[in-house]
Image (cartoon, helix red, strand yellow):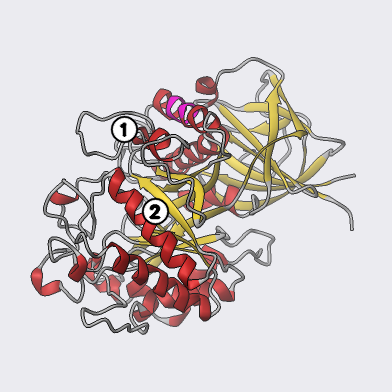
Amino acid sequence: MRKRLILIAALPLSISLKPLAAQNEKIFIIDKQTVYQEIDNFSASDAWRCAFIGKNWPQEKKEKIADLLFKREFDEKGNPIGMALTNWRVNIGAGSYENREAKEVDNSWNRTECFLSPDGKYDFTKQAGQQWFMKAARERGMNNFLFFTNSAPYFMTRSASTVSTDQDCINLQNDKFDDFARFLVKSAQHFREQGFHVNYISPNNEPNGQWHTNSFQEGSFATKADLYRMVEELDKAISEAQIDTKILIPEVGDMKYLFEIDSIAKTPDDIIHSMFYKDGQYSVLKFKNLFNCVAAHDYWSAYPATLLVDIRNRIHKELSANGHNTKFWASEYCILEKNEEITMPASPERSINLGLYVARIIHNDLTLANASAWQWWTAVSLGEDVPIQLLPLEGSNGLSLQYDGEISTTKMLWTTANYSFFVRPGMRRISVKPTYKVSDLEAATSLMISSYTDGKEVVTVAINYSKENQVISLNCDHAQKGKVYLTTIDKNLQYMGEQPLKKLQLPARSVATIVVEDN
């Protein structure tokens, strides 16, 4: 079989190969011998809409959503049909639905069922909608799951609810750490016995969050001492169950907490030094069931471009110095911030701006922070800040979406797919360098290119973030031309035929994929 070379690049808005206006050609050298991190996955979570969609929506529509998320196929015209995710984050509920009379979570969308009841009995028929998506993923060839929690079950917490009442310590009774750990492991073990590869458990989502002021969702603060104890108990429970599921922490909601020291004494800060250095006060490196990876969320760390670049270079620097090959995952993101690049009335221009904004974050997470995984928060939601947007049927309101609605893909789905559909688990990022001098910051506002390989294929991703056309040449062995898949303001990873790799025409504000046969 002939080797295949896959390249991702920003390309023209038209299938025509007519040259753009004259530009200075920019040459990029791809070096397969200079190898960086291995890619683990691209992912998203089922919170919270999938619980309703999987349980209540018409079969045809939820199958369509599952295809967009998990299926790695092309349509009859050769276009990729969706993201082809390689991991799925499953929210293991803490029982705010069962405890709803306490009115702890006031948004009915965000309440979750709990497999465990206060009498110690398990009911694994719960979370039926979420389980539908787990099965749908597996049917489409995706069998890699991460179980995460926002809170311990309400009857184990200090507040008797899934919402914290203070910011002093984890919302978990002091004598319930082992019970909580066994609950998580029992849940993972059950689904593993059903044939689902539950490879990771994340026990405390966003431990730095201001959850004591929250009534929107389940959530719990945690100190570093709390996180350490949670890892310790989970490590014991996993060993007792004799499963190979790994523990993922800390999933902080702001990347600065990985290395900065906060003025609030109990905020979990300086995470890398204190937890992922061998001599750290709360070092977790000794636990055999720990996944040796620092997980953090991209919120409040993506804008302006100076912050985007600086904080990711800092992450790489700190992790490189720990000497234990600790990975980094960018494990959650949706657009919460508002800024001049993405804040404007709904329009095609805003849509492509959002898509490119996310693509820039992915690029810099992968190339500067050496992220091995990139993961969305909600895959499906009501707003425009997610890959798949739900819209009410004509004449219906938002609550009706718990039972039926319309589906709309966003540009964020397609720009993510430029990576996720082609950059697969096990690939390694490799060197790609321009022949001209450009800083990380300059690249982040103009042209961003990264390359990946599995030894048989090479995937190169280029983002033209600027408002000007670009002309580039990609030098990788002897490849001359390739099949082009284009995402622009009016195209969604559309197959564009074959185009040359020399003097490649890159229009403003575009992302694409090129597949090349290695001669």
Give the percent coordinates (x, y) of residue 399. Answer: 22, 70
Q: Which residue is mark 2?
A: 386
Residue at 66 percent across and 28 percent down: it is 20
- In primary-sequence order, the first of circles 1 and 2 is 1
Q: Is residue 82 visible?
A: yes
Q: Residue at x 27, y 70 (%)?
A: 112
Query: What is the residue that sits farthest to the left in this orientation?
Result: 102
**Quadrant of the image occupied by residue 488:** top right
With 255 as the anchor, is 469 left or right in this view?
A: right
* Drawn side of residue 402 relative to residue 143, left or right: left
Q: Quadrant of the N terminus?
A: bottom right
Q: Can you tell which mark lies on residue 362?
A: none
| Residue 389 in view in this figure | no
Question: Of helix, strand and loop, which mostly describes the magenta segment?
Answer: helix
Mark 1, Cα crowd under 10 Å, few <14 / some 14-19 / many 20+, is few
Q: Quick one: which residue is furthest to the top in this view?
A: 437
C-alpha separation, residue under disc 1 versus residue under disc 2: 17 Å
Residue drawn at point x = 41 percent, y = 35 percent: 280
361 to 234, vertically: above or below? above
Residue shown at 46% from the left, 42% from the top: 358
Camera-side residue of 377 and 207: 207
Q: Amino acid at mark 1?
A: Asn
- Image vertical order of residue 1 relative to residue 475, above or below: below
Residue type beneath disc 2 = Val
Q: Which residue was labeled with disc 1? A: 339
Which x, y percent locates residue 283?
42, 42
SS category of the residue bearing label 2:
loop
Q: What are the residue bounds of the magenta stretch?
A: 309-314
Residue 261: image location, x then y, percent = 30, 29
